Image: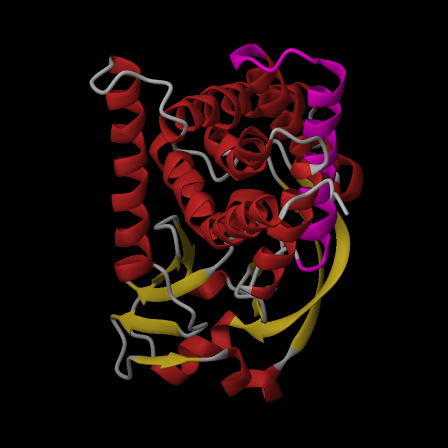
Amino acid sequence: MNYYFKTNDLVKIAILSALGGVSSTFIGYLGNVVNRFVGVPFGAGQFLAGLHIFWIILGFGLTKKEGTCTMVGVLKGMAELFTGGKLGVFVIVLSGIQGIIADAVFLIVRKKNVYTFAVSGGIATALNVLVFQVFFAPYSALHFFVLVAAIAFVSGVAFAGVFSYNVLAVLEGREKEYSMKKVSTLAVCGVFLVGAVYYYSFVYETSEKIEVNGNVENPYSFYYEDFVTYETVVTAEMVGQYKYEPETEYTGIPLGVVLEKARSKGTIVRIIAKDGYTVDFKIDALQGVIITKERRLVAKGYEGSYWVRDIVGIMVL
């Protein structure tokens, strides 16, 4: 009996799906680094979003069979979910849709060259922004949504399309031994590999502990559960320059309670995110500021850039 997907195809799909799911946190970290370099809390990191789709497009290149992108997308989403993805089950839907779109492009455009790869990667990556807008409406400004989608499209063309096509050419031995394209492709792969090793060795933490230090009498680290008896509910809306979240009830622990245990002696408290992003508050103006179980700061009365995610440190100045 002949099967559409051979055992060799399924092995390739499984490996690429696992690599894609595990690498998602590293790619997110790179995106945050770009945001920090540009000086914005979000948006600019979409320049690297195509790396999420890279594995999906490469999967098709290795099997040459429509349907591969969808399979890699769904399995990649499952791998990301079970390795602690922050989007929960939704990541399977998101990744699956990206795979379906990529498959659709390859199905429609029968000639499989670098241009087809580029278009498929660009559309699938840009769709990521559209899906988020439909389900979560993160961008209240139309021009900012269009800008972010355009950045994602360019990223998809470059990293999901052209880069995956070049990697495929190297893997299949279609490039001369010392061609510039082969050398540059291997160099980029090497940079990403070194970056990933550094990230998972020195940056990535599975712990959800938050460290409190600085100008305090009692520096310490804590888990959310350590303060669960102090939980309170705050109703707030997040109004950012380009992003908006409607008024919602948030449950968390008051930042003031955390500082009380540390016996703060300063006047300013600095909140530090995992990617190095920081914001400062006056200690006497923390009413309505809480830390949620997801280590997100809800800052009622403050604009969106103060709503820090992935808190790892609280420093008193």
Which of the 4 image quadrants contains residue 192? Answer: top left
Q: Is residue 223 magenta?
A: no
Q: Residue at x 33, y 49 (%)?
A: 196
Q: Is residue 163 toward the left or the right of residue 144 in the image? A: left
Instruction: Give the camera-side residue of 176 and 27.
Output: 176
Q: How many marks?
A: 0
Q: Residue at x 26, y 37 (%)?
A: 190
Main secondary structure along the magenta-highlighted residues: helix
Say which quadrant the C terminus sits in.
bottom left
| Residue 130 percent across, percent down from the top left | 72, 30
| Residue 20 percent across, percent down from the top left | 51, 47
| Residue 140 percent across, percent down from the top left | 71, 31
Instruction: Give the camera-side residue of 197 and 291.
Output: 197
Q: Residue at x 47, y 50 (%)?
A: 19
Which stretch did the figure color magenta?
A: 88-115
Q: Is residue 27 toward the left or the right of residue 93 in the image? A: left
Q: Residue at x 46, y 72 (%)?
A: 208
| Residue 96 percent across, percent down from the top left | 72, 43
